[in-house]
Image (cartoon, helix red, strand yellow):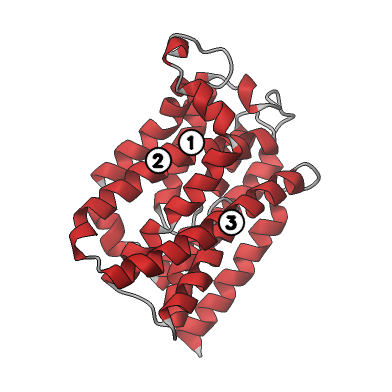
Amino acid sequence: MNEYLIAIIIGIVEGLTEFLPVSSTGHMILTGSLLGYEGEKASVFMVFIQLGAILSVFILYRDKFLRMMDLRRLTSTDGLSAWHVAAGIVPVGAVGYLLHKPIKMYLFSDLTVIIGLVAGAVLMLVAEKAARRPVVRDVEDMTVRQAFFVGLFQILSLWPGFSRSGSTIAGGLLFGMSRTAAAEFSFIIAVPLMLMACVYDLLKILDRLSGDDLAMIAVGFVVSFVVAYISIVWFLRFLNRSTLASFAYYRFVLAAVSYWYFFMR
């Protein structure tokens, strides 16, 4: 298949799934297997196009990010602050750094993704059932303590298939946040976290990229940015009137179909 068509397809998959509770990493691994696009070059491409999705969040929440980067507010915890973001990313950042090699070596396979899809779906259904009436309806009203405990749930997303947003939103529901507030917090803390992970991976392989590789990456980056922007806007509107249950059921179906395709046919 033409490399630019592959870039468009995977860029669409990344943009659609990065911030929905369905696992973008899992979808890209499964899509790469279906397209026969695997190996080191594919891994580099899939890391790079995540930057497009990151940029879409920064554009959507630029006012919040600019306010958090204001050095004069470093001593303030009124509203969403850099302290909230730090509390939300330190747990998963530390575990991800310590376990980076074994995660890449042992968890990036079709079977582990299928397991993660099922486990993440169960977590979301449990969170929906156990969630109490939200006391935090706006992301600006959450506490640093809540940010830390919600961030602990994000550690689950290190297992491909679990989903960063799914784990974080489920954690938010269990700690008194509305779905929309939890979703917005998951988007915002994803930016520094994904940026660090992408830069860490890219610095190790940048010297092995060719001009053709960069052209393909650019196509995937742009597609991922546009689709992610649209996906986030739609998802927030969806959460205002519905629950995570439909995404959980979708994950069960995807896991079953994937298991049949890769292991039974």
- Secondary structure at numbered mark 3: helix
Task: Tell me residue 82's x, y (percent).
Answer: 45, 22
Relative to residue 88, is residue 103 depicted above or below?
below
The type of residue carrying mark 2 is Leu
Q: Nearer the viewer, mark 2 or mark 3?
A: 3
The quarter of the displayed image where residue 196 is located = top left
Query: How many angstroms separate mark 1 from mark 2 (CA)?
Result: 6 Å
The type of residue carrying mark 3 is Val
* Disc 1 and disc 2 in contact, CB within 8 angstroms: yes
Of all residues, the one furthest to the right in this rendering is 241
Q: Nearer the viewer, mark 1 or mark 3?
A: 3
The type of residue carrying mark 1 is Ile
Q: Which mark is residue 226?
A: 3
The residue lying at 46 percent from left, 64 percent from top is 220
Q: Nearer the viewer, residue 44 or 22?
A: 44
Task: Tell me residue 124's x, y (percent).
Answer: 62, 49
The residue lying at 49 percent from left, 46 percent from top is 55
The residue lying at 68 percent from left, 47 percent from top is 233
Instruction: Tell whether 91 sits left or right of 259.
Output: left
Task: Tell me residue 61's x, y (percent).
Answer: 58, 35
Query: How many angstroms separate mark 2 from mark 3 (CA)?
Result: 20 Å
Q: Residues within 10 Å of mark 2 (few under 14, many from 20)?
A: some
Relative to residue 256, is residue 177 depicted above or below?
above
Q: Which residue is mark 1?
A: 189
Q: Nearer the viewer, residue 156 or 52?
A: 52
Q: Which mark is residue 193?
A: 2
Q: Nearer the viewer, residue 28 or 251?
A: 28
Query: How many angstroms separate mark 1 from mark 3 (CA)?
Result: 20 Å
